Image: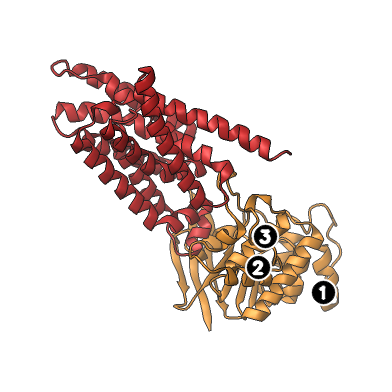
Chain colours: A orange, B red
C-alpha cells in the first residue's frame, strides 16, 4: 500500500530550484534512504513530504491513514524554555506517564522521563526525539540526518534502534543519511538525489550506478566493502579518500 | 486604589504567559516595537476622537503583523526592529504634538497612569486579559510545539504561521490594555521580566507561566504600594520591583546550583 506518492515534485526556494521533477513513492513497511551531496535538496524533499513546504508544481499525495513520526535534523531548545523529557513527549498531545515510559523504552532510554531536555547528551537527545516521533504510533518514520553529531558507535547503535523500532511497529522508514555504510546495509531502497532523482533502486544497484559513482566517487569505503563482490568496476578514477563517503 | 490594584493584576496575569513566549521565541524587541507603535495609536485615536484602546489595538496589530510578515522574508531582524520600534515612537510623539487643541498628558501614555483608571478601563483591561488567556490557553500545546521547532509542528499537523499570528494578536491586545497601567515604554518590561524571573524555578513551561503570573502580580501590587508610600510614579515603580525580584532570583539560582 502506498503511504506517500510524490509525482513530478518541483520546489523553488528563493529563485533557486531545489527540487526538479522528483517522483517516487513510499510503501508501507519499507526502508527508503535518500543520499546525495550537500545542497542536493534532501531536507527540502522531507520538508515537502511533512507539509512544511508547498510544491511549486507537482504533487505530494499522502494516504488517508498516514501518521508521520518526524525526527528533525537538529533541534535547538532555547535555554530559557524549561522542558522535561516527559513533557516534551506530550507535545502536541498530552499523554500519560505509562505511554511516555513505553516510548522511551522503545527508543532505548527508559530512565530519562524527568530529566531536563537541556541536560541530555547528543545521543540521548536524538533518542528522545525518536521516542517523541513514536508517540502517535506512526506508520511512516521520517529521519533527517538523525545521527548528525553522534560518533560512529553512537550512530551505529542509533540505527540498530531504528531497525528494532521498525520490527516492533512495522512502520515504513524514510531517512536522509550521510552514513553510506549504514545506508547500504540497512535499506530496502536507496534514492540518490541531486536536485533530481539521479538513480533509485536496491542498494547494490545504486552503488554500482554511474550516476551514484559520479557523485560519491569510487572508494565509498563501507558501502564498497560490503558490495565490492557484486560488480566489477573500473579502478582508473583517482582515489581521494578525503572527499569521499562524507559530504 | 482598589481599582489600580485590579488594573495592575489584570495586566500582570495576561502579560505573564505571553511574556514566556516572548522570552522563549526571543521576541523581546518585537514586543518593544509593537508597544512603541502604540503611541501613534494614541495620537490617531485622539485625532479621530475614538476610544484610545481601539486606536492602540489597531496600530499595534498593524505593527505586529508588519513585523511578522517581514520576519519570514529573511530581513536582518534586529536592525529592522530597531528601525521600526523607534521610528514608530518618534512619529507617534510628533503626531501627538500636532494635537495642540487637545490637552494631552503625554507622560500618562509613556509611563502609564494607573491611579487614573476608571471602572470602564478595568472592564476593558480584564476583558482583554481574559481574551488573551483563553486564546493562549486554547492553543497552548500547538504554540509550544511551534515554538520548539517549526518542522516538528508541520509534521504534527500544526501550522506554525497560524500560531505566530495567535501570539501577534495577543501581543497587540496586551499592549492596548497595558498602556494605561505601565505606559508604552515599559510594557515590554512587564512581559519579559516576570518570565525571566520565573525561569530558574521552573521545570516545565506550565510552571514557568504560573510563576511568572505570580511574580507579575506581586510586582504590580507591591509596586503600587511602594509608589504610594514613596510618592513615586507608579508604572516605573512596578517595573523596578519586578527588576529587583529578577535580580534576587538570579542570585538565588546561582547560589543553589554550584557549577
| Disc 3, SS | helix
Separation of disc 3 and disc 1 at Cα? 29 Å
Q: Residue at x 62, y 81 (%)?
A: A170
Of badges 3 and 1, the one in the foreground is 3
Sequence-first disc among 2 and 1 = 2
Q: Position of residue B153 (x, y in %)?
A: 49, 59
Rate crowding at label 1 as few (under 14), some (14 to 19) or many (20 or more) other CA atoms within 10 Å.
some
Tell me if residue A126 can be seen.
yes
Q: Pointer 1: what residue?
A: A227
Tell which subunit mark 3 falls on.
Answer: A
Question: Where, quadrant-wise, is the N terminus of chain B in this rendering?
Answer: top left
Q: Residue at x 27, y 40 (%)?
A: B125
How far apart are labels 2 and 1 at the CA level?
Answer: 35 Å
Mark 3 or 2, nearer chain start: 2
For disc 3, the neighbor class at 10 Å (few under 14, some 14 to 19, many from 20) is many
Task: Please tell me which residue lies in front, A239 or B210.
Answer: B210
Q: Quadrant of the C terminus of chain B?
A: top right
**Callout 3 and callout 2 share a chain:** yes
Check residue A104 in the rendering and tell me which mark sits there, or answer none: 2
Q: Quadrant of residue A80?
A: top right
Amino acid at each position: 500500500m502506498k503511504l506517500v506518492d510524490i509525482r513530478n515534485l518541483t520546489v523553488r526556494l528563493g529563485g533557486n530550484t531545489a527540487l526538479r521533477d522528483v517522483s517516487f513513492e513510499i510503501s508501507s513497511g519499507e526502508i527508503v534512504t535518500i543520499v546525495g551531496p550537500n545542497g542536493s535538496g534532501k531536507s527540502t524533499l522531507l520538508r515537502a513530504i511533512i507539509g512544511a513546504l508547498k510544491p511549486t508544481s507537482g504533487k505530494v499525495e499522502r494516504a488517508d491513514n498516514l501518521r508521520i513520526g518526524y525526527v528533525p535534523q537538529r533541534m535547538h531548545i532555547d535555554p530559557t524554555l524549561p522542558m522535561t523529557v516527559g513533557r516534551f513527549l506530550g507535545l502536541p498531545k498530552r499523554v500519560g506517564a505509562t505511554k511516555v515510559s513505553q516510548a522511551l523504552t522503545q527508543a532505548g532510554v527508559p530512565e530519562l522521563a524527568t530529566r531536563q531536555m537541556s541536560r541530555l547528551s547528543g545521543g540521548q537527545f536524538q533518542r528522545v526525539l525518536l521516542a517523541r516521533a513514536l508517540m502517535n504510533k506512526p506508520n511512516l518514520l521520517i529521519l533527517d540526518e538523525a545521527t548528525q553529531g553522534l560518533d560512529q558507535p553512537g550512530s551505529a547503535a542509533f540505527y540498530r534502534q531504528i531497525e528494532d523500532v521498525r520490527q516492533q511497529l512495522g512502520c515504513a522508514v524514510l531517512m536522509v543519511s550521510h552514513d553510506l555504510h549504514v545506508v547500504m546495509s540497512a535499506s530496502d531502497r536507496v534514492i540518490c538525489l541531486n536536485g533530481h532523482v539521479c538513480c533509485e533502486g536496491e542498494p547494490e544497484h545504486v552503488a554500482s550506478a554511474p550516476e551514484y559513482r559520479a557523485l560519491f566517487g569510487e572508494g565509498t569505503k563501507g558501502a564498497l566493502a560490503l558490495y565490492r563482490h557484486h560488480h566489477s568496476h573500473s579502478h582508473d578514477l583517482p582515489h581521494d579518500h578525503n572527499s569521499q563517503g562524507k559530504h | 486604589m482598589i481599582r489600580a490594584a485590579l488594573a495592575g493584576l489584570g495586566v500582570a496575569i495576561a502579560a505573564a504567559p505571553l511574556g514566556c513566549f516572548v522570552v522563549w521565541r526571543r521576541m523581546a524587541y518585537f514586543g518593544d516595537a509593537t508597544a512603541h507603535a502604540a503611541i501613534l495609536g494614541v495620537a490617531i485615536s485622539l485625532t479621530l476622537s475614538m476610544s484610545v484602546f481601539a486606536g492602540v489595538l489597531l496600530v499595534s496589530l498593524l505593527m505586529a503583523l508588519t513585523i511578522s510578515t517581514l520576519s519570514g522574508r529573511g530581513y536582518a531582524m534586529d536592525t529592522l526592529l530597531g528601525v521600526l520600534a523607534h521610528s514608530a515612537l518618534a512619529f507617534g510623539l510628533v503626531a501627538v504634538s500636532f494635537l495642540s487643541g487637545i490637552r494631552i498628558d503625554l507622560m500618562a501614555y509613556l509611563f502609564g497612569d494607573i491611579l487614573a483608571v476608571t471602572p470602564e478601563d478595568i472592564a476593558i483591561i480584564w476583558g482583554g486579559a481574559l481574551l488573551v488567556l483563553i486564546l493562549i490557553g486554547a492553543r497552548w500545546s500547538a504554540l509550544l510545539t511551534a515554538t520548539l521547532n517549526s518542522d516538528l509542528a508541520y509534521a504534527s499537523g500544526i501550522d506554525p504561521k497560524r500560531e505566530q499570528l495567535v501570539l501577534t494578536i495577543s501581543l497587540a491586545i496586551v499592549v492596548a490594555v497595558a498602556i494605561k497601567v505601565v505606559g508604552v515604554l515599559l510594557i515590554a518590561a512587564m512581559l519579559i521580566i516576570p518570565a525571566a524571573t520565573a525561569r530558574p524555578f521552573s521545570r516545565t513551561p506550565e510552571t514557568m507561566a504560573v510563576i511568572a503570573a505570580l511574580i507579575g502580580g506581586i510586582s504590580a501590587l507591591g509596586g503600587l504600594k511602594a509608589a504610594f508610600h514613596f510618592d513615586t510614579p507608579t508604572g516605573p515603580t512596578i517595573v523596578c520591583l519586578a527588576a529587583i525580584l529578577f535580580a534576587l532570583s538570579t542570585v538565588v539560582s546561582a547560589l543553589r546550583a554550584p557549577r
